[in-house]
Amino acid sequence: MEILGLVLAALVGLSLGLLGGGGSILTVPIFVYALGFAAKEAIAMSLIVVGATSLVGAIRHWRAGNVNLRVALAFGAIAMTGSYLGARLAHFVSGPTQLVIFALTMVLAAVFMFRDRRETITAPDPAPSLAPGAALVLLPGFLVGFLTGLVGVGGGFLIVPALVLLGRVPVKQAIGSSLLVIALNAASGFAGYLGQVEVRWATVLLFTAIAVLGIFVGSSLVRHFSPRTLRRAFAVFAVAMGLLILYQNRGVFGAHIVSTNVPASTYQAGVSGDVA
């Protein structure tokens, strides 16, 4: 992996350390536009990065007492099912179409990030488990997992509100628990991609290792910055990147979305463009 890839991997880790999220939003575009991987390869490899970095974050939150294992495992179980299914169905969706869905998700995530999480999420009276909202979180859990498997997004911006508002989990525990759910989702989604794509293990493991180091650096620097300002600046960047990805894959809107036999040249359409 060239120097640019190493620098960008560090930036992924820094964003996670400074913001507590946003890694998946950066990882897929980096693999596609900076490192030149096809969309499906990029999504599969990003799941390794997202899963590993989320697990590191979950462990740190668990040590601080901010992970509700019962909630995370219950929510994660249904989400893993959706993630695996999304990854298997990705075989029938073209690479550029996956990037379009990813870009739309980026814009949606940016909307959530631009709004202060503490101001927009008010937890009900906390409960020790998902009851009585257990049934209510099943559908969001499955949908978040499906999205993770299909396009590689972590989905923390959706998991946290679902755990707080439907699972009645305190905000701090929801954030820590969501990281464990994301790690489980990513592992299940990657399992769904096995046999579909070629994984460049040397590249992805080095990228992941640098990103994890970046998390610790970012965490040590976070006290010097305003989290709200950082989050909103990142949201603006995410919108710009999402719109650019949509523009570069605009041909999808005039083509058939689903194909059972997509040629390699079609996948590469998501790689070419002005950003490479």
Image (cartoon, rainbow, N blue to C red):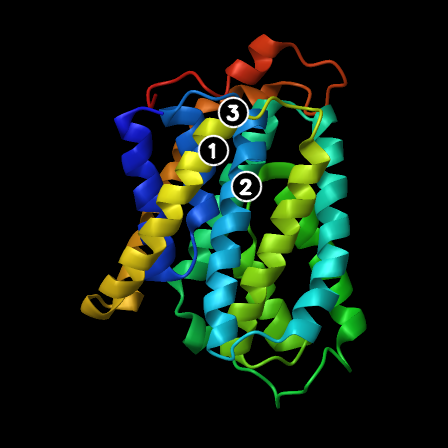
> Badges 3 and 1: C-beta atoms under 8 Å apart?
yes
How many residues crowd around disc 1 within 10 Å: few (fewer than 14), some, or many (20 or more)? many
- Where residue 204 is drawn, which disc sits there? 1
Q: Is residue 185 visible?
A: yes
Q: Secondary structure at mark 1?
A: helix
- Which three-letter amino acid code belongs to the residue tagged 3? Arg
Q: Nearer the viewer, residue 151 or 219?
A: 219
- Where residue 200 is drawn, which disc sits there? 3
- Which three-letter amino acid code belongs to the residue tagged 2? Ile
Q: CA distance from mark 2 to mark 1?
A: 7 Å
User: Is 24 left, or right, of 158 in this rendering?
Assistant: left
Ranked by sequence position, the earlier of labels 2 and 3 is: 2
Q: Which residue is mark 2?
A: 48
Q: Is residue 121 visible?
A: no
User: Is 69 left, or right, of 61 in this rendering?
Assistant: right
> Badges 2 and 1: C-beta atoms under 8 Å apart?
yes
Quadrant position of residue 31: top left
Q: Given the current orientation, which residue lies at the most extreme bottom position?
A: 125
Q: CA distance from mark 3 to mark 1?
A: 6 Å
- Which three-letter amino acid code belongs to the residue tagged 1? Val
Q: Nearer the viewer, residue 204 or 135?
A: 204
Q: Position of residue 56 (x, y in %)?
A: 47, 58
Q: Position of residue 237 (x, y in %)?
A: 32, 45
